[in-house]
Amino acid sequence: MTLAAAALLTAREYAIACNAASTARATAEGWTFYILHPEDEAYWAEQAAEYGIVTGADVIRRDAIQCYSDTYKEIYSIRPSWVNFDGIETDKIGEMLTELQDQASESDWDAIAEADADEDLSLTEREEDLLRTLPAHLIHAWGLDA
């Protein structure tokens, strides 16, 4: 679903649609663990009242900011608290995340992999693993599933 299409849905409607798509993909690919958005009305009423998250586009934006922050912290061990996301378009945040992933040198990814002693991943598998951590709706909205 594109950002424009998500903007036409309420946040709850968008969550339900994403959950259906994620569950279908997880079932088809045999995933044993995946995360779904809350679907209850009270949760989305609270998100709207406290954070202004009203549409599906707002959910994409929230998740994009969180993914950027989580990825930055994974690479540099500090959250980018100095970045003011208020003045940045959602598509630009997606570009920033892609650039952040591209900036990480192979040695950065090697250090991350070494820190996780349970897994021995090649660079291609690590990239796929990182991509899998992104919410499916962001992967699609940014065209990373093409």
Image (spheres, rainbow, N blue to C red):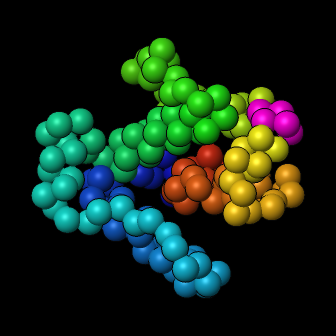
Taking the image as shown, residue 57 lies to the left or right of residue 75, namely left
Expressed as whole percent of the image width and height from the top left, the position of residue 117 reads 72, 57
Q: Quadrant of residue 77?
A: top right
**Magenta: main secondary structure:** helix
Taking the image as shown, residue 75 lies to the left or right of residue 22, namely right
Q: Give the range drawn in magenta.
A: 104-108
Res 76 visible = yes
> Does residue 114 lie above or below 14 as drawn?
above
Expressed as whole percent of the image width and height from the top left, the position of residue 127 reads 76, 52
> Does residue 47 lie above or below 136 as drawn?
above
Assess whether residue 50 is covered by the magenta stretch: no
Expressed as whole percent of the image width and height from the top left, the position of residue 97 reads 63, 35
Assess whether residue 105 is covered by the magenta stretch: yes
Residue drawn at x 82%, y 44% is: 110
Taking the image as shown, residue 63 lies to the left or right of residue 54, namely right
Taking the image as shown, residue 9 lies to the left or right of residue 51, namely right
Res 57 visible = no
In this view, the residue farthest toward the front is: 117
Q: In which quarter of the image is residue 71?
A: top right
- Could you tell me which quadrant the C terminus lies in? bottom right
- The residue lying toward the viewer, choosing from 40 and 104, is 104
Residue drawn at x 55%, y 60% is: 136
Residue drawn at x 48%, y 15% is: 82
- The residue lying toward the viewer, choosing from 126 and 36, is 126
Residue drawn at x 66%, y 34% is: 75
